[in-house]
Amino acid sequence: MFARLVYESFRRQKRRKLLAGSAIALGVTVATAMIAVATGIGDKINRELRSFGSNIVITPQEDSLDLDVGGVSIKPPSDGAFLRESDLPLIKSIFWHHNILGFAPMLPASATIETIQGPQAVAVLGTYFAHPYSYGKETLITGVRTTHPWWRVEGAWPEDGGHDLLAGEKLAARLNIKPGDTVTLAGTAHRVSGILSTGSAEDDELVAPIALAQELLGRPGAVRRVFVSALTKPEDAFARVDPKTLQGAVYDRWYCSPYAQSIAYQLQQAVPNSHAEPIRQVSQNEGVILARVEGLLLLVTIAALLASALTVSAAMANTMFERRAEVGLMKALGAANASVASLLFAETALLCTLASLVGFVLGTVLAHEIGSRIFGSHISVQPVVLPVVLLLAGVVTVAGSAAAIRRAVQMDPVFALRGAA
């Protein structure tokens, strides 16, 4: 009889049940999609942020030495401090080597260029453009085209093994250099394959394969600094802990977390005579951006659930008003308050379960669309999300229907039947 009463309630009140169920399904759809996006957004946002450049820099160890004399901080001269180019493959030997998306060594030099006005001193920056690297079974194409994606070239990029170079746009305008021109640098002719625009100091420099800068300096295999682009976990309080103060399992947890600080620490261990540190402006802003995006997703989820709760409350209040004669008749025939309440809550629970399953399926589709259209990759909904959204839907349904059911249970059958008559 109990099951029949529940069935008849759904059969006779299709429109009311559909309205309440649609509200629950809509809330669950949004909640499912937002939870899926929030749990998978970290790596995707980090990959998007990597389009803004590198987030770790490696320099010679001597650059990090400080000397304090009489209260005055004196840094030792570091013009002669270099890293070895042959050590760069060790960057891919760290624990988080799969998180290293690319690196670009830099070596500044100077040379004399022949112009119509006569010889002029110019700054030359040696680097990788798209250099193939391999470490073990892993291969990588790395260079400034990966770590400095905002660099724009009018013309063509030089080959790393060639003798072509780029001219910064300010230098090119001053010396009237165009793509395809030939310039004489330190007595050797080089073709300018393109004009470089970075919005920084490189606009007034020549950018060449690193071998050319090494030749100009007379330092084969030398590197001044290395910019590294790595996927990292947003910075929190634990990330900023000094690893020298950690021991045991706490140290292992810090070391095995992909913080920018821990990856820099591992890079410093891997590359001999080096000092690595995160680029603070980048690593700190990543955490701020991710926290704000996650906060926005949370607000959207809460708003959707509140809207669902209000809709369910209105629908249930209207339903209880229409069913006051039915409830009054049950109580007049001897039904206890607990029996009436259990019947109404059973209907609500069944409606919640069916609507939640529909909402979960729709939320999975919505999460997939968000991933493909915004991030260009797939966002999967983990099975553990289902019990979470079922719990949220249950809370929303109970919050929306409890007041109406409470009024129905406390209804005096005499007044309920008299009102119906």
Image (tube, rainbow, N blue to C red):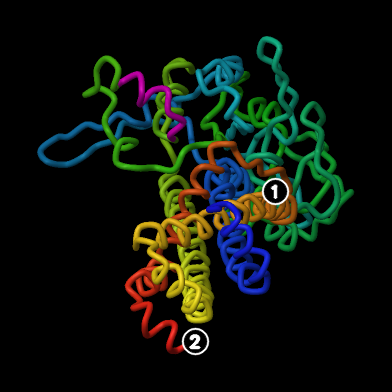
Discs 1, 2 touching: Cβ within 8 Å: no
Q: Residue at x 44, y 25 (%)?
A: 81
Q: CA distance from mark 1 to mark 2?
A: 104 Å
| Magenta region includes residue 55 | no
Looking at this view, is 235 or 191 the one in front?
235
The x, y position of residue 255, in whole percent, is: 38, 23
Residue type, numbered disc 2: Ala
Looking at this view, is 25 or 106 the one in front?
25
Looking at this view, is 80 or 207 the one in front?
207
Q: Residue at x 62, y 72 (%)?
A: 19
Looking at this view, is 211 or 283 the one in front?
283
Residue 148 figure quarter: top right
Q: Which label sits on residue 213?
A: none
Q: Residue at x 81, y 42 (%)?
A: 157
The residue singled out by tag 2 in the image is 420
Front disc: 1 or 2: 2
Residue 162 in sight: yes
**Direction front: furthest residue:** 333
Q: Name the side, left or right, on which 252 lies relative to 181.
A: left
Q: SS for tag 1?
A: strand
Q: Is residue 250 above or below residue 19?
A: above
The residue singled out by tag 1 in the image is 119
Circle nearer the N terminus (1, 2): 1
Q: Name the side, left or right, on which 287 lies relative to 48.
A: left
Residue type, numbered disc 1: Pro
Residue stretch rendered in magenta on the structure: 251-259
**Direction right: furthest residue:** 180
The x, y position of residue 297, in whole percent, is: 51, 59
Q: Name the side, left or right, on which 7 lies relative to 62.
A: right
Q: Is residue 95 above or below residue 301?
A: above
**Direction top: furthest residue:** 136
- For mark 2, does the 10 Å Cα neighbourhood hold few (<14), some (14 to 19), or many (20 or more) residues? few
